[in-house]
Image: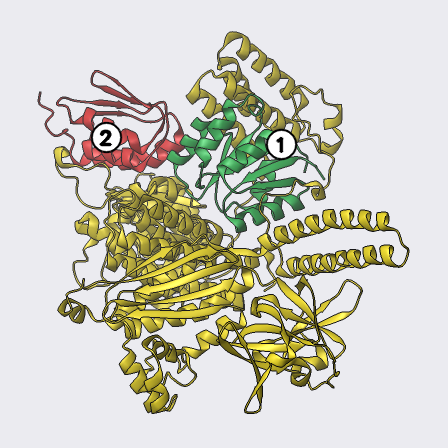
Chain colours: A yellow, B red, C green
Amino acid sequence: MTNPLLARFIPEARELLQVSASGLLKLERNPTDETAINAVFRAVHTIKGSSGLFDALALTRLVHAAEDLLGEVRSDALQIDSALVDMLLDSLDQVGQWIDALERRGALPADADGVAHRMATLLRERLGAQDDGPDRAPADGPQQGADPAPLADVATLPPALLARLSAPACLDAFRRACGGEVVHLVRYAPEPGCFFSGTDPLQAIRQVPGALALDIAAAEPWGPLEAFDPYQCNLHFALLSAAPRPEIEQAMRYELDQVTIAPVRPRDLVRIAGEASDGPIWDDFREAASGFLAAGRHDELRQAVSALRSVAGATLWRRQALDWLDAALSAGEPDPALVAALVAAAGSGRLDPVPAASALTAAPAPAPQPAPQATDPRQDLARTVLASQHRALERTGYDADRLASVGTVVGNVLLSLGRAADRAAIQAAFEAAREAQSVAPVLSALSAVMDGAPLQRPETAPALPDALPQAFEEAAPAAGAKEPEGRIAPKSLKVDQAKIDLLMNLIGELVVSKNALPFLAKRAEETYGSREMSREIKEQYAVIDRLAQEMQGAIMQVRMLPVSEIFDRFPRLVRDLARKLGKRIDLALEGEDTAADKTIIEALGDPLLHIVRNSLDHGIESPDERRAAGKAATARILLKARQEADSVVIEVQDNGRGIDPARIRAAAIAKGVVAQEEADRLSDQEAINLIYRPGFSTAAEISDLSGRGVGMDVVLTTVEKLGGQVSVSSRLGEGTTTRLALPLSMAVTRIMIVEAAGSLYGVPMDMIVETVRVPRERIRMIKTSETFVLRETIIPLLRLSRLLHLPESPRGEADAAVLVCHVNGRRAGLIIDNFREGMDVILKPLEGVLTGIGGYAGTTLLGDGRVLLVLDLRELL
Amino acid sequence: MAIRIVRKTVHLEGHCTVEEALPLLEALRRPGAHKVVLTQCQGLHTAILQVLAAARPATLTPPADPALAGLVMPFLEASRQAAPEAPGAAA
Amino acid sequence: MSGKRILVVEDGITMRMFYQDVLGRAGFVVEEAANGVEGLEKALLGGFDLMIVDINMPKMDGYELVSRIRREPSLQATPVVTISTEAQDADATRAYEAGANFYIVKPADPVLLVETARLLTGAQA
C-alpha cells in the first residue's frame, strides 16, 4: 500500500467500525442511550467523510445509507430494533471487508458497486417503511421501484419529461451529443424523509456540473393543502448534464443510490413544437435534401437547410425541425439515420421514430471535451469568497465582532490577487462601517469590487505584495518564517511500538547502570577508605534511583492499555454466539478502564475468548432449561476487571448451570486424565480444576464455538506464561466464576540474587515464599529425597547446583541456605550456597544459541557489567 | 428569518431554510388569495420549493437572481397552471 | 513557502493527515486539533492565519467552536473556513451565522482547498 493517506485511513476506519458495532449493541439493549447513538452516528459519519478521499464510492455510498438510517434513529424518527441492528452490523461488516480489500489491493472488489447498491437499498427500505410513502412501495415486482439499478447503458427520456424541458436547452444538449459529447440524464428520486438527514435535494442536484436542463416534478400529485406534510420530500429531479459520469457521481456521491445516471442518445432529445404549415417550399426542400443525403453531400444539405431557415417563420413546427437538422449536421460525422429522420420531419411535418439502424452509435465515446475555461478558476473562487462575505454581512447586519474576520478575509483575498487599490478602498469602507455602526459601506464596496472592475490578477503577482501598505492587521505570525518542523506537538501521538520498546530498553540500562553505584560506594569505603565519599555516592544513588523509577513508571504508563481493548470485542461475539446457540445472554462489562501493559492486554484476548466461549457452550443453559430451573430465561455473563495491588484481575462470571464435580471426575477418568483412585481423592474444588489439565477437553465437547479442539489447559498455559494465575470456582446450578490474575506490567521483574556453585543466579521474587537457614541435622532423608520440616510441613529439598548439573562445592557450614519456593502449586526448598540482594531488573529473553536451553527465564545485566542468568523454576523443578 | 409576512403577501428573502417551510405553509393555508414575492430570495430549500408548488399562490414574483429564477420558476409556473385557482381561495 | 499558519480542527485522523499533506505541501504550517475544545485551546495560543473547522465533531461541534472564536477578542480577526460533508444550504447558512467566513463541502478538492487557504491568508500562489 503506497498511499500514506490510505494507510492512515485503514486503521482509523477499523477503529471507528469497532466503536460503531459496540455502540449498536448498547443501543440494542437500551434504545434510548443517547451517548451510544451519538457515538455510532459520529463514527459512521467520520468514515463517510474520510472515505470520500479515496476511490471507494461504493463504500461511501453504503456508509452514507447507514448514516441516514442512524440519523433517523438519532432524531427519534425511527425506532431501533434487533433487525435494524442486524442490518447495520451486516453493513459495517461489509465495510470492514472492503477496508481489508483496500488494504490488500488498494481497491474495492469488482462486485462492490452491486453489493453497495443492494445493501443500501435494504437500509433505505427501512427508512421508507417508516415513511409509509406510497411511492416507496414498488407497485409491481420487488425491483420495479421508481429507481432502476443505476447500470442502464442508455437512458430514454419519457415524453412527458422531454416535454417539460425547455426546447433551447434540449437543442443545446442535442447539438453537444451530436458533436460527440456524452450527455447524461441524471434522475434523482430523493428519499421522502431526506430532509431529516439534512439533505436538500435541490441543492444537491445543483452541485452537478455541466447542467444543461433541469426538470423538477412532483412525485405524487399534490393533495389538499390541509393534509400536506412539508417535511416529506415529494419532488423528483431530472437533469441533463454534459459533465463526465465520474464528475456527476462525485457531485452526487452521497445520494448515489437514489440516482440513476445514463447517457442519452441524441435522437431521444429531439423535441419539436410549433404551428403546422404547408407549401411548396417544403416539398422542394424535401426532394433536394433527400438527394443530397443519399449522395452523402452534407455541405450542400447544410446550405439548403440554412437557406430555408432564413425564410421560414421561427414559430413553425417545420422550421424548428430544420433547427434540429442543422444541429445534427453540425457534427463532424453526422448520424445518417438521425439526419434522414429529421429531413423527413421537415419535409412531412411530423417526426417518425428514428430507426435504430445505428443503435448505440449515437453516443460515441470520444473523450468528453472539457468545458472551455472561460475564466480563471482562482478568480472565480475569489469572487465566491467575496460574495460569501457579502451575504454573511447582509444577513447578520452590523456586528463589530464579525466585521473583523470579514476584514481580514477581504483584505487577504485582494492581497492574494495583488489588488492594492481595491484593498485600500475596502479598508476605508471598513473604517466607515465601524464609525457608522453599519455594514452598508462595506456591502457597497464589496459589490463594487465584485461587479465593477473584473477581478484582475497582475502577471507579476509575486513582486507586488511587499510594496503594499499593511492596511489590515495581518495576523503576522511569530512563527511565520518557520518551516513545518516547528509545529507544536499535538496532544496525542501515535507512536511506533518499537520506539517505546527502545525507550524501555534504555531505561532498563539506566536502571542497571544505576545499580553500579552501590558497588562504587562499597569500593570507596573498602578500597579507598573514604566513608564520606561512600555516603555521598549513596545519597546520589538514592536520587538517581528515585528518578529512574519514576521514569520507568512513566514509560510503563505509555505502554498501558485499558482492558476495554479486548472487552469491546465481546458484546458482538457473545451476541452472535448466543443467537447461534439459541441462548439468551445479557453481557455486562465492568472496569473496562482498568489498564495493564500492552503485552498483557494483547495476550489476554485468546484465553478470555476461550473462557467466555466455554461458558456460553457449557455453562449457560437454554432459555427453556433455565425457566424449568426457576431462573430468568436470559442468562448473564459478567466480564469484570479491576486492579489488585500489582495485578490486574479479570473475572468471567456466569449464572449458568455451574460445573458438576462428579461429572468432571467421571469425564477425567474416562479420558484417562486421572486414575480412578486419584479422582476419588480429589476435593470438589480440585476436581473442578481438572478442566485445566491437558487433554481434558475432547472431541465430544468441541462445538464449532468452543473452539478448535483446544482445551482449557491452553488458557492456563497462556496465563502462566504471562506470570499470571487462573482459578475457577463454581456452584452447581448457580454459576461459574473464572478468575485470571496477571501482573500489571511485564517489564520489570523483581529478583533475588543467589549464589550456587560459585556463580550468581537470579530467582524471580514472586516464586520465593521465604528464605531460611536450615541446620544440617534437621535435613532428613525420606527415601532418596532430602526434606526438612518447616512449621509442621514437610518440604522437599533440591540442590540448585545439581539441578543445573554443576559441580557441588562441599561446604562445611553448619546451616544450609534454603530458598522456599512456590512452584507449580506446591512448595519446595532450594538449597543454595548463599542469599544475596534483591533487585529490579529488566529481563531479556535468551538469544541465539541459548534460546533452546531450558530452565532459564532470561538474562539481565548486573551493575558491575556481569550477565546474570535468571532461573525459571517452573521448568527446573 | 428569511420569511416576512405582510397581510396576504409573503416575502421570502435571502436563503430560505427548511425551518421556514412550516411557517410558510401555515401562511399559505390561510384562506384568501396569496401573493408570494421571491424578488430578494437568494436560495431556497427543497422543502420551501414544494410548499410553493403545493400551495399554488395566486401571484408569484420571481427571484431577481436569474439563475435561481431559471431553476425554480418553470416548475412553479407549471404547478400553478396545473390548478390556477388556489384551493379554498373564495374568502 | 508561505509560512502561513493554519489550525485544522477535525476529529478524523485521516482527514487531518489529508490537510496536513495537501496544505503542508503548499507551504503552509499546519497544526491540528482533534475536537472543538482542543481547537479553541490551540487557537487561543494564537498566531494562526486561518482556521479550518470541521462541523461534526465530538465535545464541541464546529458551529459552537466558530461562535466561540468570534466571541474571543484575540480571534475575531482570524478567518475561519468550515467544512462538512453536508452540501446543504442550511448547514452553510448556520455556519455563516455562527461567524464562519467560508464553507467547503467535504471531501474538499485539494486544489480548491489550497487556493481557498491562499486567498484567505493573503498568500501568493
Kindly identify the amino acid type of the residue bearing the numbered disc 1. Answer: Phe
Residue A149 x %, y %: 31, 61
Q: Nearer the viewer, residue A490 or B8?
A: A490
Q: Does the rendering let one see residue A456?
A: yes
Q: Residue furthest front?
A: A777
* Residue ID at (29%, 78%): A661
Residue A871 x %, y %: 64, 75
Q: Does the rendering let one see residue A281?
A: no
* Residue ID at (63%, 20%): A422
User: Which of the image's four quarters has the C terminus of chain A?
Assistant: bottom right
Q: Is residue C64 left or right of residue B34?
A: right
Residue at disc 1, secondary structure = loop
**A765 versus A466 height, above or below:** below
Question: What residue does disc 1 label?
Answer: C48
Question: What residue does disc 2 label?
Answer: B22
Using the rendered view, name the quadrant where residue A608 is placed.
Answer: bottom left
Q: Nearer the viewer, residue A160 or A859?
A: A859
Q: Is residue A462 left or right of residue A495?
A: right
Q: Are marks 2 and 1 in contact (CB under 8 Å)?
A: no
How packed is label 2: few (under 14 Cα within 10 Å), some, or many (20 or more)? Answer: some
Q: Nearer the viewer, residue B71 or A181?
A: B71
**A67 versus A700 height, above or below:** above
Asked if badges 2 and 1 are on one and the same chain, I answer no
Q: Residue furthest top?
A: A436
Residue A296 x %, y %: 45, 62
Kindly identify the amino acid type of the residue bearing the numbered disc 2. Answer: Leu
Alpha carbon separation for disc pair 2 and 1: 42 Å
Q: Is residue A757 left or right of residue A597?
A: right
Q: Nearer the viewer, residue C85 or A574?
A: A574
User: Which of the image's four quarters has the N terminus of chain A?
Assistant: bottom right
